[in-house]
């Protein structure tokens, strides 16, 4: 009997915080965070909803646990080497991880995330910047500036209403709304996209290079 087999298996497999977290991560990845609930998670685990509360006190705690699981996928930047390379790799990895878990960026930017994994990542980041010659205040500014850009870039990429292959046709469609006599430079940029001389894509690496070069002027090399 399929139902009985599933129930028996769930009794044999202990319900642990790790098992609950991984199941919640899969649900969020597959169905989106808005559909994640304690009842839905319990059904996926083959247990009663009340059983979850022995391991996760509330939905808010579950969201904190999800952030921690995502953060654990981000390697810590090393100290004492090429700080630009370390910060660049960190930002690119954060972007890749957040694109994999498409629901996670808003949790990163809208919650006070102080789990052990997040604290270790922040501490390692500050350590890398301090070793590179940044004061504590400037290390704080540098870390938050890079993260703000990376999160914002990711959110825009996740939510932009057009696919890259549609940029040229979309630009042509909206061109009558931006006549050159009123919007000469916006019209000119649109013409570049329509003609295929510019793909219209924004690049995380380019923005990072601009930020890293600017931040480099604010440190005291050791």
Image: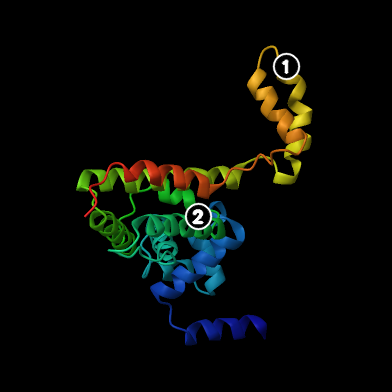
- Frontmost residue, 153 versus 54: 153
- Frontmost residue, 82 versus 116: 82
Q: Residue at x 54, y 86 (%)?
A: 8
Q: Residue at x 42, y 58 (%)?
A: 90
Disc sitting over residue 179 in the figure: 1
Q: Residue at x 53, y 59 (%)?
A: 96
- Frontmost residue, 87 versus 44: 87
Residue 67 in view in this figure? yes
Image vertical order of residue 200 relative to residue 191, above or below? below
Q: How many marks?
A: 2
Front of the two marks 2 and 1: 1
Residue 30 as seen in the image, left or right of residue 122: right
Q: Residue at x 74, y 29 (%)?
A: 191
User: Disc 2 designates what residue?
Assistant: 95
Image quadrant in which the C terminus is located: bottom left
Q: What is the secondary structure assignment of the residue under circle 1?
A: loop
Image vertical order of residue 146 relative to residue 38, above or below? above
Residue 110 as seen in the image, left or right of residue 5: left
**Which residue of the protein is positioned furthest toward the front in this rendering?**
222
Q: Where residue 52 sits in the image (x, y, percent)?
A: 42, 68
How packed is label 1: few (under 14 Cα within 10 Å), some, or many (20 or more)? some
Q: What is the secondary structure assignment of the residue under circle 2?
A: helix
Q: CA distance from mark 2 to mark 1?
A: 36 Å
- In which quarter of the view is residue 91 placed? bottom left
**Which residue of the protein is positioned furthest toward the top in this rendering?**
181
Sequence-wise, the earlier of marks 2 and 1 is 2
Q: Where residue 16 sits in the image (x, y, percent)?
A: 40, 76
Q: How is the image coloured?
A: rainbow
Disc sitting over residue 26 in the figure: none
């Amino acid at each position: 009997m399929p139902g009985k087999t599933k129930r028996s298996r769930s009794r044999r497999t202990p319900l642990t915080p790790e098992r609950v977290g991984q199941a919640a991560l899969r649900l969020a990845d597959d169905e989106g965070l808005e559909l994640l609930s304690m009842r839905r998670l319990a059904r996926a685990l083959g247990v009663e909803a009340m059983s979850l509360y022995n391991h996760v006190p509330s939905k808010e705690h579950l969201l904190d646990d999800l952030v921690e699981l995502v953060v654990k996928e981000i390697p810590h930047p090393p100290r004492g080497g090429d700080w630009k390379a370390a910060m660049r790799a960190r930002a690119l990895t954060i972007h890749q991880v957040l694109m994999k878990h498409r629901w996670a960026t808003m949790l990163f930017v809208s919650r006070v995330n102080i789990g052990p994994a997040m604290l270790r990542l922040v501490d390692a980041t500050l350590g890398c910047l301090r070793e590179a010659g940044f004061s504590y205040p400037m290390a704080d500014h540098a870390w938050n500036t890079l993260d703000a850009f990376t999160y914002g870039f990711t959110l825009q990429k996740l939510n932009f209403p057009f696919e890259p292959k549609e940029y040229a046709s979309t630009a042509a469609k909206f061109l009558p709304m931006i006549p050159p006599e009123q919007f000469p430079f916006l019209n000119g940029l649109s013409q570049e996209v329509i003609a295929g001389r510019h793909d219209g894509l924004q690049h995380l690496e380019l923005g990072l290079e601009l930020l890293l070069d600017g931040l480099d002027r604010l440190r005291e090399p050791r």
